[in-house]
Amino acid sequence: MPFLSDTLSRVKPSPTIAVTNKARELKAAGKDVIGLGAGEPDFDTPQNIKDAAIAAINEGKTKYTAVDGTPELKEAICAKLKRDNNLTYTPDQVTVGTGGKQVLYNALMATLNPGDEVLIPAPYWVSYPDMVLLAGGTPTFVEGALETQFKITPEQLDAVITPKTKWLIFNSPSNPTGAGYSAEELKALTDVLKKHPQVWIMTDDMYEHLAYDDFKFCTPAEIEPELYDRTLTVNGVSKAYAMTGWRIGYAAGPKDLIKAIGKIQSQSTSNPCSISQAAAVEALNGPQDFIASNNEVFVRRRNLVCEMLNAIDGITCPVPEGAFYVYPSIAGLIGKTTPAGVKIEDDETFATALLEDKGVAVVFGAAFGLSPNFRVSYATSDEALKDACTRIQEFCASLS
């Protein structure tokens, strides 16, 4: 009798974590490596948030909390959703987890049965399909295209919905592309969903505040109130507040679903860290002005990376509306050969050769479900980005 579960054969380790770990290993071995794989801001957590955590420690708030979040944090989440998204929720419609990933996973575990389908626009965050598989569901993909900034169309969405479709996972601005849906684009998608009452919407709004230029963030339940009762609006404090390591995510939705998510969590992790929750209260209720300042830095870095990558023959790099990623196409490089004789057959070959030859770690597009591309995270210093993009230019120029 096998010792390990058959479930493990349905999933794979996170490619983004693998790339980050590989870059760390090479650096530890003395290699000159620039890692562009990590999906976290390089900014420090704001001081007022750290101070709130220190105060919570000093006040003895180090005990278990309610399984799915403290009353104070749930109230702060309700206030945030009303303030920023014009969505009205009560605390019993809110759940808090150990990062947005756990909230998404809990929701899928609480709702999926064998045969249930989950629609996932591609390119997608690497964890979506594997979480669906772990929960016993079937991921179904609908591909965006370079011509549409990787965004799916209403016609595509309508064509892939079946009677077995239970969820659509929706992420805007997107990881890995940074693409954001306008209110008009999102309304066209929600009009399709209104015709299919069996389909629920799971939004991943983690990059909500990382929106640039004239792009205005919006979320499905805000755009189409008719979908309020079958939408789980997921968010967290990790990206905009530079709190990735604090591990706090949250969601708001129908009470029965929130209760079911809490039931799953009660038998897995129980409550998120009490100190992180106190810090998250301050993040949501406290000053928000630093977000705009950080975004100015991100826009500068985005423009730098897009300009340098678009200067390369064979690479096309769309300028994204948000997040801190770009997702350039390498269609013009497929079939070329490195000086060492390695043929660039796909984006994984490209990323491997780039790391070995130039010490630049990126994530290959196949990991996100759409090739031939690669993802660059520009959440690092201007100097590192200039150096990395120069190396990419040199690498591509060496291909024949």
Image: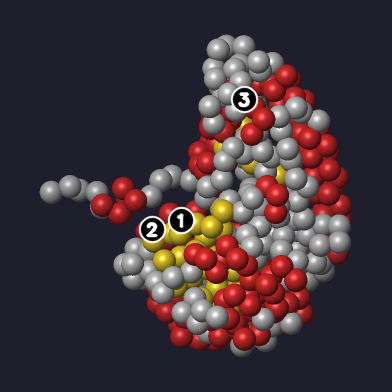
Give the vertical position of 133 relative to 166 (above or below): above
Viewer-side residue, 84 vs 367 = 367
Q: Quadrant of residue 165?
A: bottom left
**Which element is circle 3 on?**
helix
SS for dot 1: helix
Q: Disc 1 designates what residue? A: 129
Q: CA distance from mark 3 to mark 2?
A: 31 Å
Label 2: few (<14), some or many (≥20) within 10 Å? many
The residue at 69%/23% (across/down) is 396
Residue at image coords 64%, 34%:
331
User: In screen coordinates, is 259 left or right of 273?
Assistant: left
Q: How many marks?
A: 3
On the image, the x and y values in percent for residue 141 come to 50, 57
Q: Which residue is mark 2?
A: 133
Say if residue 363 shows up in the picture: no
Above-or-below relation of 328 to 106: above
Report the front residue among 368 and 379: 368
Tell me the number on the disc at residue 218: none
- What residue would you read off at disc 3? 354
Residue 185 placed where, x, y %?
Answer: 71, 68
Q: Is residue 303 visible?
A: yes
Give the amino acid type for the residue marked by disc 2 in the picture.
Leu
**Could you tell me if the residues under marks 1 and 2 are in contact, i.e. CB atoms within 8 Å?**
yes
Q: Position of residue 164 (x, y in %)?
A: 39, 72
